[in-house]
Image (cartoon, helix red, strand yellow):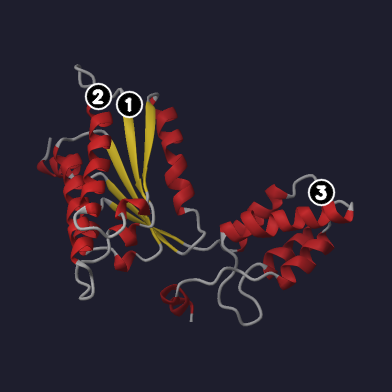
């Protein structure tokens, strides 16, 4: 075995999912364990670490909450390998809105308690690596540049998520309205209108389409007592407002 292989084995099992709002980062993080479990034929437990780990600002509270969270993950993951070394079960630690929990300590206005919390987060992640526990930490963030450099440096991969292009929007809309009599030309117009149009440099996110556009179209049809039509979708898309990106993302489109 060449020395480079040891570096692969020793790297931190941390992945950062970064990108615009509503692009599927959290949904992927919450569901990828199912695919892993089926592939490896073992159980995979998801531990979500939410903003509640920040506490209420009391001295030492954030550090204590993060330490307890990592202790719980450790307790579960220690039994992940059998005595023969074979994998018995895996664990995924999900840190959503990671820029709030792992914000850069370079910020001059950062509170001491937040700095201590970031230190505790880094210690917890390093502890999982050193013990080689079968734990994958996934961080989701809309602002990857706000995450502490020490955290980003540890990531085995940073995966960028973007708003769907026309092909992605079309695939989602055609699947949602399969079985309707919407003509291909009408669907193409809906796809165009849900993209960057009328001087707006950004189109709909996956979340915009799945949680707002599609349900609204269905409810409109139900209220009117009719089937969903292409004309209805075009009218809705013409007045639909996509979620505005963060300013940094918006600047990148200009």
Q: Which residue shows up at 25% across the image and 54% down it?
A: 62
Q: Which residue is mark 3?
A: 180
Do residues under tags 2 and 1 come within 8 Å of each other at their CB atoms? yes
Q: Which is nearer the N-term, disc 3 or disc 1?
A: 1
Please indicate whether residue 189 sits to the left or right of residue 204 in the image. Answer: right
Q: Which mark is residue 79?
A: 2
x%, y% of residue 31? 47, 40
Q: Is residue 228 visible?
A: no
Q: Which residue shows up at 20% across the image and 76% down it?
A: 108
**Disc 3 element:** loop
> Is the residue 210 above or below the residue 75 in the image?
below
Q: Which mark is residue 89?
A: 1
Crowding at dot 1, Cα within 10 Å, few <14 / some 14-19 / many 20+, comes out as many
x%, y% of residue 199? 62, 82
Could you tell me how far apart the alpha carbons at marks 2 and 3 are, in whole angstroms?
A: 50 Å
Q: Which is nearer the N-term, disc 2 or disc 3?
A: 2
User: Which is more toward the observer, 116 or 216?
Assistant: 116
**Disc 1 element:** strand
The quarter of the displayed image where residue 30 is located: top left
> Is the residue 227 above or below the residue 162 in the image?
above
Q: Which is nearer the N-term, disc 2 or disc 1?
A: 2
Q: Nearer the viewer, mark 3 or mark 1?
A: 1
Do residues under tags 2 and 3 come within 8 Å of each other at their CB atoms? no
């Amino acid at each position: 075995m060449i020395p480079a292989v040891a570096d692969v084995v020793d790297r931190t099992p941390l992945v950062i999912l970064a990108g615009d709002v509503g692009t599927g980062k959290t949904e992927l993080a919450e569901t990828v364990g199912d695919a892993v479990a089926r592939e490896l034929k073992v159980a995979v437990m998801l531990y979500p670490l939410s903003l509640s780990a920040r506490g209420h600002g009391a001295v030492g509270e954030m550090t204590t909450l993060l330490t307890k969270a990592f202790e719980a993950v450790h307790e579960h993951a220690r039994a992940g390998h059998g005595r023969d070394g074979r994998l018995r079960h895996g664990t995924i630690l999900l840190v959503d809105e990671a820029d709030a929990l792992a914000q850069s300590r370079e910020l001059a206005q950062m509170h001491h308690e937040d700095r201590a919390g970031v230190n505790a987060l880094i210690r917890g992640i390093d502890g999982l690596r050193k013990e080689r526990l079968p734990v994958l930490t996934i961080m989701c963030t809309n602002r990857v540049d706000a995450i502490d450099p020490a955290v980003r440096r540890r990531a085995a991969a940073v995966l960028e998520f973007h708003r769907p292009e026309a092909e992605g929007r079309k695939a989602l809309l055609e699947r949602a309205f399969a079985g309707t009599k919407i003509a291909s030309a009408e669907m193409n117009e809906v796809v165009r209108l849900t993209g960057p149009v009328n001087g707006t440099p950004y189109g709909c996110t996956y979340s915009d389409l799945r949680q707002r556009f599609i349900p609204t179209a269905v409810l409109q049809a139900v209220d009117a007592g009719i089937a969903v039509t292409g004309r209805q979708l075009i009218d809705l898309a013409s007045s639909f407002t996509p979620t505005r990106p963060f300013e940094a993302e918006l600047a990148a489109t200009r």
